[in-house]
Amino acid sequence: MKYSVLHSLVCICCSAMLIASCAGTKLTRSQVGPAFQGAPVSNILVIAVTKQPENRRLFEQKFVVQLKQAGVDAVSSMKAVPMPSDLKLEKSAILAAVGKYGADAVIITHLKGKTEQEILTRSSYDGLGFYNNYGRIYNYAHDPGYARTQTDVQLETNLYDVETEKLLWSGQSTSMDIDSRKQVIDEVIQVVIRDLQKHGIIASK
């Protein structure tokens, strides 16, 4: 009995830690494409579409690492495909990389949008009584507080079957009030992989 209770507590704590690690990012939409026939993909070419080469490198490398940790073979487009000067990959180059590395799927992520809003924080009031409460409300209303800018990032990720070129899965994620680029990347990849596993599109390890 004691072991059972302890085991349950450990599982709850681990689950809470996993949820907390992705607290700033969530999938706002995910959809399994009609082309998915139930057989999980096993080897994925990862493509990040961005104007910043460093962001592309970082995203693709982290995605490859996490996919491999989940038991899926993967390769980054930066490693597999020579990048032209205009940063646009040609279909022939992508298919050549797919053949070379034996990929059965291609996953593409791009920035869908970014919003910024100013958040004003002021002290709270909780006074009781007519004038005491009035005084606290007055002070609250005249408190300049402090402002900060909150940045929310929306990404779209699509997974395609190589043979048919049809959509297997699509998802949109929102990362709220993110402190760093690395945090966005890590959390987006985590929620995407978790949803792909949930739907059996990649096998659960």
Image: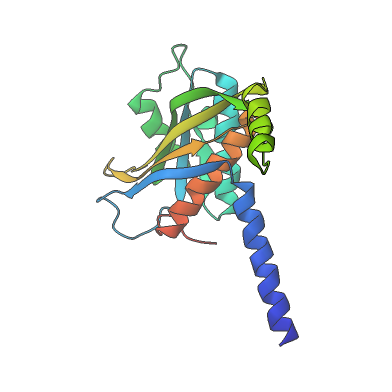
In the foreground, 97 or 152 = 152
- Horizontally, residue 9 falls left or right of residue 66, namely right
Q: Is residue 165 above or below residue 34?
A: above
Where residue 72 appears, x then y in whole percent?
A: 52, 52
Give the quadrant of the N terminus.
Answer: bottom right
Q: Is residue 24 above or below residue 16?
A: above
In the foreground, 153 or 135 = 135
Q: Is residue 3 above or below residue 191?
A: below
The residue at 35%/59% (across/down) is: 39
Q: Quadrant of residue 110?
A: top left
- Horizontally, residue 118 falls left or right of residue 30, namely right
Where residue 125 appears, x then y in whole percent?
A: 67, 37
Where residue 93 appears, x then y in whole percent?
A: 39, 27
The residue at 50%/49% (across/down) is: 193
In the foreground, 186 or 48 = 186
- Can residue 54 be seen in this snapshot? yes
Colour style of the rendered protein structure: rainbow
Q: Residue furthest bottom?
A: 1
Where residue 90 appears, x then y in whole percent?
A: 36, 23
The residue at 48%/46% (across/down) is: 192
Q: Quadrant of residue 135?
A: top right
